[in-house]
Image (tube, helix red, strand yellow):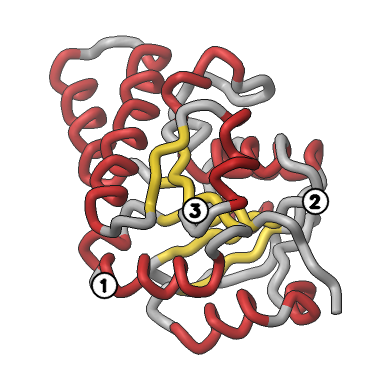
């Protein structure tokens, strides 16, 4: 059976209000402890950044940095919801955390100046940052957990529709990492993918129109 050393699990910010987060986190921890790192979305914290920028008209570069800080806030909240979740501030700490029974939650703000290939604009959301992180880990698979089902398996189509951010297709083409998108409101599908890597290819997003 094919095995992947690490899942990079992106939790969409919309999951905060669409389903019980504690139950989802418990499922992920049972299924992925020792082989996964969680990437938080921005959620309501990123929404506050958008509102502030609209009101005060500051530049996108500043808003981008604030949105990354919003991911940190969301991640810290996740860590407070389960005792086996631990903040990950330095990627060098990842191997050590994976060897235990804890699940690291990446807080990306300290890495914001090292995000090569990721523009400091709203074109790159937390999805692109999660893909960037997957690109830093050998043979990683990116699992995007969303509150809705992807209407297509085409990365370009999903970007055009707003399901993924504008920059995602370019980063996807460069990093060549497997990307799986699952509706978190369908636990059987999520569990099946996590437990059987041989079916990953059935769910992977594809490049092209």
Check the image and name the residue furthest to the front: 100
Across and down, in percent, residue 27 comes to 42, 75
Which residue is at a point 24% across and 57% down the rendered structure image?
81
Q: Which residue occupies the foreground of this view, 37 or 99?
A: 99
**Element type where label 2 sits in the image:** loop
The C terminus - image quarter: bottom right
Q: Are marks 1 and 2 in contact (CB under 8 Å)?
A: no
- Residue denoted by label 3: 10
Of callouts 1 and 3, which one flags the residue occurring earlier in the amino acid sequence? 3
Check the image and name the residue furthest to the bottom: 188
Marks 3, 2: nearer the viewer: 2
Of callouts 1 and 2, which one flags the residue occurring earlier in the amino acid sequence? 1
Of callouts 3 and 2, which one flags the residue occurring earlier in the amino acid sequence? 3
- Residue denoted by label 1: 19
Check the image and name the residue furthest to the right: 1
| Total number of numbered discs in the rendering | 3
Q: Is residue 179 above or below residue 187?
A: above
Q: Which residue occupies the foreground of this view, 89 or 16?
A: 89
**Element type where label 1 sits in the image:** loop
- Residue denoted by label 2: 139
**Element type where label 3 sits in the image:** strand
The N terminus - image quarter: bottom right
Distance from disc 3 to disc 2, alpha carbons, whole Å, reads 16 Å
Q: Is residue 128 above or below residue 23?
A: above
Across and down, in percent, residue 13 comes to 33, 52
Q: Which residue occupies the foreground of this view, 53 or 15?
A: 15
Distance from disc 1 to disc 3, alpha carbons, whole Å, reads 15 Å
Q: Is residue 17 above or below residue 31?
A: above
Across and down, in percent, residue 9 comes to 53, 56
The image quarter containing residue 196 is: bottom right
């Amino acid at each position: 059976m094919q095995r992947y050393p690490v899942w990079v699990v992106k939790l969409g910010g919309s999951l905060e209000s669409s389903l019980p987060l504690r139950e989802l986190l418990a499922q992920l921890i049972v299924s992925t402890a020792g082989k996964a790192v969680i990437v938080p979305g921005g959620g309501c914290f990123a929404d506050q950044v958008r509102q502030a920028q609209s009101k005060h008209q500051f530049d996108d570069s500043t808003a981008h940095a604030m949105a990354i800080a919003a991911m940190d806030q969301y991640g810290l909240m996740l860590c407070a919801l389960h005792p086996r979740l631990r903040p990950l501030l330095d990627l060098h700490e990842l191997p050590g955390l994976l060897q235990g029974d804890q699940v690291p939650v990446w807080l990306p703000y300290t890495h914001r100046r090292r995000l090569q290939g990721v523009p400091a604009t709203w074109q790159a959301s937390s999805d692109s940052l999660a893909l960037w992180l997957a690109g830093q880990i050998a043979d990683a698979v990116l699992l995007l957990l969303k509150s809705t089902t992807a209407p297509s398996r085409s990365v370009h189509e999903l970007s055009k529709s707003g399901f993924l951010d504008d920059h995602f297709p370019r980063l996807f083409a460069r990093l060549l990492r497997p990307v799986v998108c699952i509706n978190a409101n369908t636990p059987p599908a999520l569990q099946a993918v996590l437990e059987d890597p041989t079916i990953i290819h059935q769910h992977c997003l594809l490049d092209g129109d």
